[in-house]
Image (spheres, rainbow, N blue to C red):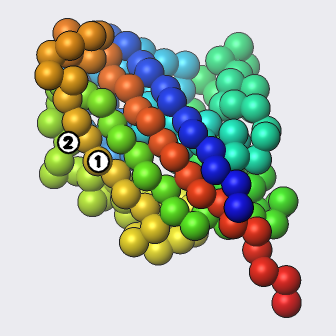
């Protein structure tokens, strides 16, 4: 077994929505990022890469490379899970916590779970997405940005 933890943060900027877990969530601002700014998926990528000792998302998809400008983070996640699978590991379970004072995302978490399960090639009951505020404390509480934590457990594929 291998365990990985991922963390990511993005600052709010101009826009009319944020993308979280591959879901467009209406909001009065967007997130500033080189890619689509999906802080949730970026944390998941970092958890997977960390579990495999493969560095972080910036190492594989640097913001200095214009190939990743406005990149779809679900595509990046699928590339990361392919790296994991190439080393004969599968996702046993994934737990993600989104830290956001706004927008409220509770009505979108099921769709986020479905997207993650599809991209990770696992069942929905192996993925959990939850959200919390920070009770108006810190940069999240001041509504300056959004953060996400992800923890993943990988298991070695059984040999046939």
User: Could you tell me which residue is drawn at 15 percent across and 36 percent down?
Assistant: 104
Asked whether, in this view, residue 109 is left or right of residue 125, the answer is left
Category of crowding for the residue at label 1, using alpha-carbon neighbours closer than 10 angstroms: few (below 14), some (14–19), many (at least 20): some
Above or below residue 19? Residue 11 is above
**Residue at image point 69% right, 39% down:** 50
Task: Name the residue tied to disc 2.
Answer: 105
Q: Quadrant of the C terminus?
A: bottom right
For label 2, the SS is loop
In the displayed structure, 131 sits above or below 154; it is above
| Percent x, y of residue 9 | 44, 21
Query: Which residue is rendered at x = 33% and y = 37% of the image?
Result: 98
Viewer-proximal residue among 127 and 75: 127
Asked if residue 14 can be seen in this view, the reply is no
Q: Is 99 rendered above or below residue 13?
A: below
Q: Earlier in the sequence, mark 2 or mark 1?
A: 2
Residue 4 visible in the picture: yes
Q: Residue at x 76, y 68 (%)?
A: 156
Checking the image for residue 130, the label placed there is 1
Residue 22 placement (x, y as % from top left): 40, 46
Tell us which disc is closer to us: 2 or 1.
1
**Disc assigned to residue 86:** none
Position in image of residue 151 (x %, y %):
51, 46
């Amino acid at each position: 077994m291998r365990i990985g933890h991922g963390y990511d943060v993005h600052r709010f900027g101009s826009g009319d929505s944020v993308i979280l877990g591959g879901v467009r969530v209406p909001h009065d601002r967007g997130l500033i990022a080189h890619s689509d700014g999906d802080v949730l998926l970026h944390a998941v990528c970092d958890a997977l890469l960390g579990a495999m000792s493969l560095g972080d998302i910036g190492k594989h998809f640097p913001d200095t490379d214009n190939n990743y400008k406005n990149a779809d983070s679900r595509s990046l996640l699928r590339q990361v899970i392919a790296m994991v699978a190439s080393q004969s590991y599968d996702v046993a379970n994934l737990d993600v916590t989104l830290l956001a004072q706004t927008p409220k995302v509770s009505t979108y978490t099921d769709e986020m779970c479905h997207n993650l399960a599809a991209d990770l090639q696992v069942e929905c009951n192996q993925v959990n997405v939850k959200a919390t505020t920070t009770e108006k404390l810190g940069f999240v509480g001041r509504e300056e940005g959004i953060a996400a934590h992800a923890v993943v457990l990988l298991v070695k594929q059984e040999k046939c």
